[in-house]
């Protein structure tokens, strides 16, 4: 009897272990997660129309890669590869195995911190607002590395601008190169300092149903400036890693008569984003809106915003400690 019971217990234990192991490698749950990703995209993603391929066909092709031996880390890789086909820096998946994103800048992108060589001193008003004065000139300088911090980190712009007025600077350079965005409300805090009229700056519309082509009406965005606005000449520096909320900042101020943009075309991240939790705890983020430049009537997603004067930094000059974009801005403001 005891021997029979032990055999029965062993059989039950083996069945339990077999079922448990099968649950761990059964692809059905992971296929379901992949289906969730595309289902959320179909309800919320704003840029299906930009792609020459069939998103449905892409989905089916990647879905077939999920097999009985696929584990969670491999599933992350499959989803990442699928999302990257949309070439959207705002289309991401966040998992314990990493974050998937699309590298939206080209290989010839050059990142430097050479601006400090041109300043008497770089002063940190906050981690997100740094300022100083161009050496041997009457020009002010502001570096904004991101728009992702809390609002007080950007509200320090008020005393900074007050200091510039006391020093009677004749022009200002705002460097948003390498700024990949954050919160557009923070961008507006900075932009209000330079707005002398409330003419529309850009327009936005949002996905509003499960139909891919269904959007709200376009709404024009206006900003009311702070009195008195800074009205001396301003040059904004951009490059391919100027993205998302930094591009929104650019749209907010570029239509002002005293503002000029110098540098490279921006990265092209137009949409505002939303996030959705998946059933396994992973988080999917995606563009939920379209943003359009008023003057060109174009959505700048993937295209980017062109500067008034285009200059692309080179590794050769950077290696010689020359900031080509900043030097062109100094020349512009000095009238050379």
Image (cartoon, rainbow, N blue to C red):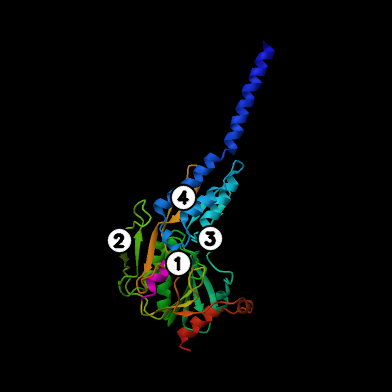
Residue at the disc numbered 3: 102
Whether pointer 2 and pointer 3 mark residues with C-beta atoms closer than 8 Å, the reply is no
Name the residue carrying label 1.
Answer: 246
Q: Position of residue 16 (x, y in %)?
A: 60, 27
User: Circle 1 — which element?
Assistant: helix
As drawn, is 19 to the left or to the right of 230? right
Measure how far apart labels 4 and 3 are at the Cα level. Answer: 17 Å
Do the residues under discs 1 and 4 have CB atoms within 8 angstroms?
no
Query: Which sits in the foreground, 128 or 165?
Result: 128
State yes or no: discs 4 and 2 in contact (Cβ < 8 Å): no
Q: Residue at x 44, y 68 (%)?
A: 247
Q: Which residue is identified by label 4?
A: 38
Q: CA distance from mark 1 to mark 4?
A: 28 Å
Q: Quadrant of residue 48?
A: bottom left
The Cα–Cα distance between marks 2 and 3, rounded to whole angstroms, is: 29 Å
**Marks 4 and 2, the one that precedes in the sequence:** 4
Q: CA distance from mark 4 to mark 2?
A: 25 Å
Q: Residue furthest bottom?
A: 336
Q: Which residues are magenta?
A: 248-255
- Was residue 147 drawn as part of the magenta stretch in this picture? no
């Amino acid at each position: 009897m005891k021997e029979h019971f032990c055999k029965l217990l062993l059989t039950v234990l083996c069945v339990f272990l077999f079922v448990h192991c099968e649950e761990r490698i059964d692809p059905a749950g992971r296929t379901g997660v992949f289906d969730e990703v595309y289902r959320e995209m179909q309800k919320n993603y704003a840029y299906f129309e930009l792609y020459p391929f069939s998103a449905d066909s892409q989905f089916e092709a990647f879905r077939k890669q999920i097999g009985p031996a696929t584990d969670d880390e491999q599933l992350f890789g499959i989803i990442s590869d699928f999302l990257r086909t949309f070439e959207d820096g705002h289309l991401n998946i966040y998992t314990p195995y990493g974050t998937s994103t699309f590298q939206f800048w080209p290989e010839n992108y050059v990142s430097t911190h050479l601006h400090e060589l041109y300043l008497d001193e770089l002063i940190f008003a906050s981690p997100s607002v740094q300022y100083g004065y161009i050496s041997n000139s009457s020009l002010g300088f502001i570096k904004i590395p991101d728009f992702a911090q809390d609002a007080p980190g950007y509200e320090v712009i008020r005393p900074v601008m007050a200091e510039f007025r006391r020093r009677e600077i004749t022009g200002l350079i705002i460097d948003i190169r390498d700024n990949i965005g954050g919160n557009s409300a923070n961008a507006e805090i900075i932009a209000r300092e330079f707005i002398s009229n409330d003419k529309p700056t850009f327009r936005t519309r949002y996905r509003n149903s499960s139909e891919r082509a269904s959007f709200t009406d376009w709404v024009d965005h206006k900003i009311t400036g702070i009195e008195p606005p800074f009205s001396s000449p301003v040059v904004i520096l951009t490059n391919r890693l100027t993205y998302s909320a930094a591009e929104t900042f650019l749209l907010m101020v570029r239509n002002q008569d005293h503002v000029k943009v110098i540098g490279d075309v921006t990265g092209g991240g137009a949409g505002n984003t939303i996030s959705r939790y998946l059933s396994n705890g992973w988080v999917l983020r995606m563009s939920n809106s379209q943003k359009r430049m008023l003057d060109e009537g174009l959505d700048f997603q993937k295209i980017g915003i062109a500067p008034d004067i285009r200059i692309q930094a080179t590794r050769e000059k950077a290696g010689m400690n020359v900031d080509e974009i900043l030097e062109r801005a100094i020349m512009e403001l000095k009238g050379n």
